[in-house]
Image (spheres, rainbow, N blue to C red):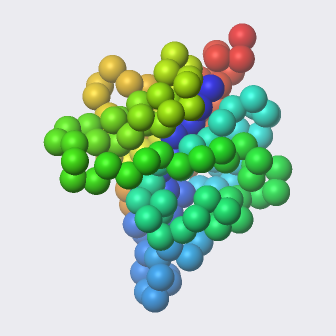
């Protein structure tokens, strides 16, 4: 199972951006990160792919360093950038391009994002509130989906 993970509004909620005025891209919210990591920790066969504009600022290696040591190996890549070349559901198109590149087009996947406009309604997307980020409710939803996939 692939998890396509956005960062702004998910692990870096808007409520924390004022805390670091120089660079909002410097760290994740510790609670959002804890909820996310605890939800994925039992599932070592998942693949986390960064689906965030952070890919334009940080390398995969740099982004991995924001995560705990045991989660870092689960982060396997970043979606390609197609900004401005696709008119609708751009992030969804980037996810499909990533899966095609990995020769894994039939793989099960879900997205975690704060923007419902990035994916068609038929997709499995855990939506977070931009100002709050990934929280207990998001973690429960993710855990239920991962548990069901593990059966």
Q: How many marks?
A: 0
The answer to which of 89 and 59 lies nearer the viewer is 59
Report the front residue among 64 and 42: 64
Residue 16: tell me if it is visible.
no
In the rendered image, the vertical position of residue 135 relative to residue 18, given as above or below: above
Q: Is residue 150 left or right of residue 57?
A: right
Residue 1 image-quadrant placement: top right
Query: Which x, y percent locates residue 117?
Result: 25, 41
Q: Residue at x 60, y 47 (%)?
A: 77
User: In the current view of this chain or complex, which residue is farthest to the bottom?
Assistant: 22
**76 lies left or right of 95:** right
Foreground pick, 74 / 127: 74
Q: Classify residue 15 as left or right of residue 5.
A: left
**Residue 19 visible in rendering:** yes
User: Farthest top residue?
Assistant: 151
| Residue placed furthest toward the right | 70
Residue at position x 38%, y 24% in the image: 123
Q: Is residue 125 above or below residue 56?
A: above
Quadrant for the C terminus in the image: top right
The quarter of the picture where residue 144 lies is top right
Q: Residue at x 82, y 50 (%)?
A: 70
Q: Position of residue 99 (x, y in %)?
A: 50, 30
Residue 18 image point, x, y percent: 42, 81
């Amino acid at each position: 199972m692939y998890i396509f993970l956005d960062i702004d509004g998910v692990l870096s909620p808007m409520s924390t951006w004022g805390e670091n005025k120089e660079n909002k891209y410097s760290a994740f919210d510790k609670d959002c990160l804890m909820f996310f990591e605890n939800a994925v920790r039992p599932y070592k066969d998942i693949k986390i792919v960064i689906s965030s504009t952070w890919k334009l600022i940080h390398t995969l290696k740099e982004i991995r360093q924001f995560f705990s040591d045991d989660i870092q190996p689960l982060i396997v890549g970043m979606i390609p950038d197609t900004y401005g070349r696709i008119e609708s559901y751009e992030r969804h198109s980037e996810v499909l391009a990533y899966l095609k590149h990995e020769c894994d087009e039939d793989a099960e996947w879900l997205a975690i994002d704060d923007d419902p406009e990035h994916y068609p309604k038929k997709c499995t997307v855990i939506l977070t509130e931009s100002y709050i980020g990934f929280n207990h409710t998001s973690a429960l939803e993710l855990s239920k989906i991962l548990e069901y996939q593990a059966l």
